[in-house]
Image: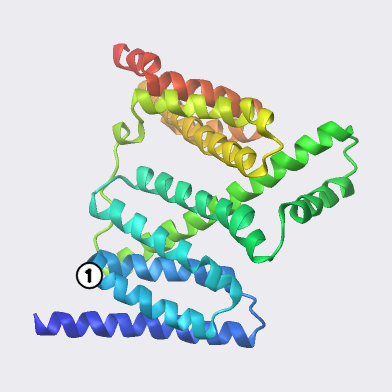
Amino acid sequence: MYQNKIKMLTRAAMYTAIVGALLLINNLTGFLFESVFTLLISVLLILYLREYGYKYGLVLSIAFFVIVFLWGGLYVLLYFPLSVIAAYVFAYCLNKNYTAYFSLLVLIVVMCLGEYLLTLVILPILGFGDLASLLNDVQTIIDGMNIGLSNSQESNLVSFTFALALLMTALFEALVIYLASNLLFKKTKISGFRKATFDDLKINPVSSYVCLALVFVGFILSIYVRDNAIIYYGLMLLGFIASIILCFEGYVFLLLYLNKKGRLRYNLYLLVAIIFLVPYSLMILIVLGFLFASGPLDAYLKRN
């Protein structure tokens, strides 16, 4: 018992020292790597929470906060709460033995919510940028492409691109945390996620209807609240997340169908076709994903 506590304190001190040393290097390089350190904090905290639990993880979180407050830049300090929340949510999914697929989806939602609140609410309140300036930056990029759109079409494209940028940022952050954590689980021989089967990848029918409703609300009904940027972009992000889930479910159905026909080796060609046929392929995947998760296509696979 005593040796375990010594090991726990040593590990906490080592993680704190790593973060502190890297933050000092970041300061010397003009805060070039701030975004990386917010993800590093989440990954190290996930490893610690997995080994020693939530209570001792809180102690490490406080130690991280002290280091970030002393040597971290403003970006790291503002994103620190999101890093801690993401780590606790991910560790909770691990401890509940959820599948990697479900845990990653939860992590993406958390990061989306965090990016949304920071970009549209917290940072503007603190005076570090506003939505209008961000949209102007996006519009400048689009204007430079000389696409030849009308004013209304360009305005819609700017809004869509901005919401998509928020989603892609959150998606990238979630993937980095997920992949880095799994890699370190293997290196440190800490138990990670249980292996998922195809059945684990299928959401329940109720969730499929919820996702379809969110797609409808996010991309159609959201235009009626466009004057309220916070609600508008919040609904669009929900629509994006729901679309990703249904697209993935559609892809799972196609893989199961190929497997039934003994042609799973063609899955690479399927993926290439999906990429080249965007956005039509995404619409098809959403429909297939809904029909698969809600029941009809799942029943078709089981009959055949």
Q: Residue at x 59, y 35 (%)?
A: 272
Mark 1: give few (<14), some (14-19) or many (20+) Cα within 10 Å.
few
Where's residue 73, x and y in %?
59, 78
In terms of secondary structure, where does tag 1 sit?
helix
Q: Nearer the viewer, residue 253 or 289?
A: 289
Residue with the mark numbered 1? 52
> Amino acid type of disc 1?
Tyr
Where's residue 150, x and y in %?
89, 32
| Camera sees residue 261 | no
State the image quarter where residue 9 is shown.
bottom left
Q: Is residue 292 shown above or below 228?
A: above
Q: Is residue 285 left or right of residue 153?
A: left
Q: Residue at x 36, y 22 (%)?
A: 260
Where's residue 107, x and y in %?
42, 51
State the image quarter where residue 292 is shown.
top left
Q: Is residue 227 shown above or below 171?
A: above
Q: Is residue 243 shown above or below 61?
A: above
Q: Is residue 57 shown above or below 131?
A: below
